Every structure is written in C-alpha cells, then in structure tokens.
Amino acid sequence: MIRVTNIERFATHDGPGIRTTIFFKGCHMHCPWCANPETWSQKVELLHDEKKCVHCQMCRTVCPASAIAFPEGKWQIDRSRCKGCQACAQECLNDAITFSGTDYTEDELVAIAMKDRDFYEESGGGVTLSGGEVFMQPEGLKSLLKKLKAQGLHVALETTGSYAPAMLREVVDDVDLFLMDLKHLDAGKLNAITGGNGELVVANFRYFAKNHPEKIVIRMPVIPGFNDESETIEAVLDFAASNHIQEVDLLPFHPLGASKWKNLGRPYAYEKEKMMEKQKLEPYIETGAKKGVKVRVGG
C-alpha cells in the first residue's frame, strides 16, 4: 500500500516524453519554498480554501472530534484533534474542504499508469515516482518499481537524495532515470534551511558517478536568497562535471504553491517573492556547455 497526494497524467516536466507522475506522501525535508507542502506529513491532512467557504457551518456540525469552530464567524480547525475521517468534506456545500492523502495498492497504481501506455510508447515517456520523498515508503516503492518494470515501462524516480546510500542500491536496477535534487553544496546551509543531510546527498551522487552516471540528472531549484548566486550555481555545475554527470536542470523559483500553504494553515515565507524569469538562468546554458554539462532551464 502506498499513500499518495496526487496522480498527474500527461505530465511533460518529470522526465522524457509523456508521463504519469505519482506523488508519494511524506518527506523528511521541509523546504520553505516547497510547492507541495501537503506532501510533508505522511498523515492524511485537511486543506481549507477560504475563498470557497460560504460559512454554512455544516462541517462543524458533523465533525465527530469537535475539531472545527467558527469564532466570530471565521472558520478555524484544531488540527491536533482532527482524525481525518473526512465527514466535513462530504458535507461541504462548496468543496472548500479537501483532504490530501489517498492509499492505493501497487496493482492499482500500475493499472492507472497502464491506461496511457500508448502515449508513453509514442513519446518515449513512462512513469515518474515523485513526492515528497519516495524513500519514505520504501517497501511500497520497491514493490511498485518491480511491477512497473514487469510491464516494460520506463521509470523515472525523483528524489532529494537525503537518505542512506544502501536504500538507493536496493532499487537502482529497477529505475531507468534518477532526477536528483541538489539544492546546495553547503551541507550546513542545506540542513539549517531544509532539514536535509548534505553529506548523504553528496555520497549518493558520488555513488552514481562511480557506477551509473548515465542514469542521473541533477535538478536544482533556484531559490532567491538561498542558492541563486552565480558562485553557488557554478559550483553545482562544476560538481556535475567532476562527477561525470551530463545534465543539470535549473528550475526557476515560482510561488505557485502559495495557496496550499494557506489552505494548510501555514505561513509561507516566499509570499512576496515574484516568479523568477527563465531568462535569468539562460546564460548558464553556455556556462555549462563550456564545462561539458548540458544545462536545461525549467527541466
């Protein structure tokens, strides 16, 4: 059984061709710019869209845990009391309440993926497992990978790389392409801001450099004030070149996940930050080429 937050069919930014991307729930890294904060916790979580709420208070009436209240007419929830029963969502008149986290068997996920097999074959696509962090559900991950490969599908795996290398070695033969985040080479800064283990990230990249350099693409989300300085970006390009990794995707910051933070009741640190223009990063295409690294802007 695997808990997911979303299944995106006809995806075109998570590997080659047309793909089905399955987003696993659960992540040990908590990046303050994350576009999918609903993937952090492995628990089923409630999201409330204030714009859709008509304050009918039906949700408060049916909640068996008395977790919802309307002080001074404003919707409020005590998340520590919410049991995830979803009774409130079923009664919501305007779909203002939704829940993130649905459990699927591995066979159910394969069946969904197989619906678009013809598109994969025509476009050179396949299935991408993303998150969150897929290694937060290791047993389900390993089972799903083997079932997808048994169907002859191309499988990409997107990961933070912040976990024990032994876990990576267990699945490497069942994955065609690894899309691995490299947010910063300063391990201390990475840990302080995201909670990730930079030393493990580098160890996993070095494993690939030695054993499977053709299977890896570095993905670097470029975040204002965190890693958008030219020195930091060029250091990642140098790291790729020295480790025989041929492609780096630079992903410009965007605030498109801001509404999810609000709906989860969390403050969003980048609320006032504007979307980064792709043109800002395009000069690194030439910089990478001089180092023998293909740079793509946007992935």
Image: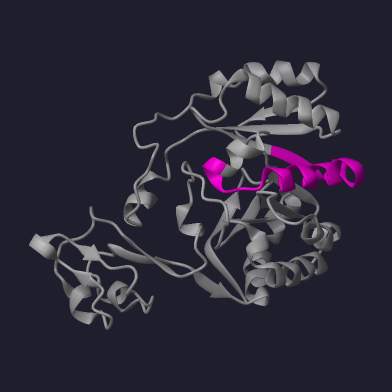
- Give the left or right position of residue 9, taking residue 248 as reference: left
Horizontal and vertical percent position of residue 115:
64, 65
Q: Indicate the quadrant where residue 138 lies.
A: bottom right
Horizontal and vertical percent position of residue 161:
70, 49
Residue 107 belongs to magenta span = no
Instruction: Give the camera-side residue of 254 and 190.
Output: 190
Relative vertical location of residue 92 with respect to residue 6 in this rendering, above or below? below
Instruction: Give the camera-side residue of 155 and 9.
Output: 155
* Residue drawn at 72 percent across, 16 percent down: 287
Relative vertical location of residue 273 with respect to residue 39 in this rendering, above or below? above
* Residue drawn at 73 percent across, 52 percent down: 156
Instruction: Give the camera-side residue of 24 and 163.
Output: 163
- Give the left or right position of residue 233, taking residue 94 as reference: right
Q: Is residue 16 visible?
A: no
Horizontal and vertical percent position of residue 68:
23, 71
* Residue drawn at 23 percent across, 57 percent down: 52
- Give the left or right position of residue 263, taking residue 1 as reference: left
Q: Indicate the quadrant where residue 134 lies.
A: bottom right
Q: Indicate the quadrant where residue 199 lies.
A: top right
Is the magenta region chiefly helix, strand or loop? helix
Q: Which residues are magenta?
A: 192-218
Single out the residue that lies furthest toward the right. 211
Q: Pick the quarter of the image with the C terminus.
A: top right
The colour scheme is: one colour
Horizontal and vertical percent position of residue 249:
67, 33
- Give the left or right position of residue 84, taking residue 291 as reference: left
* Residue drawn at 14 percent across, 59 percent down: 74
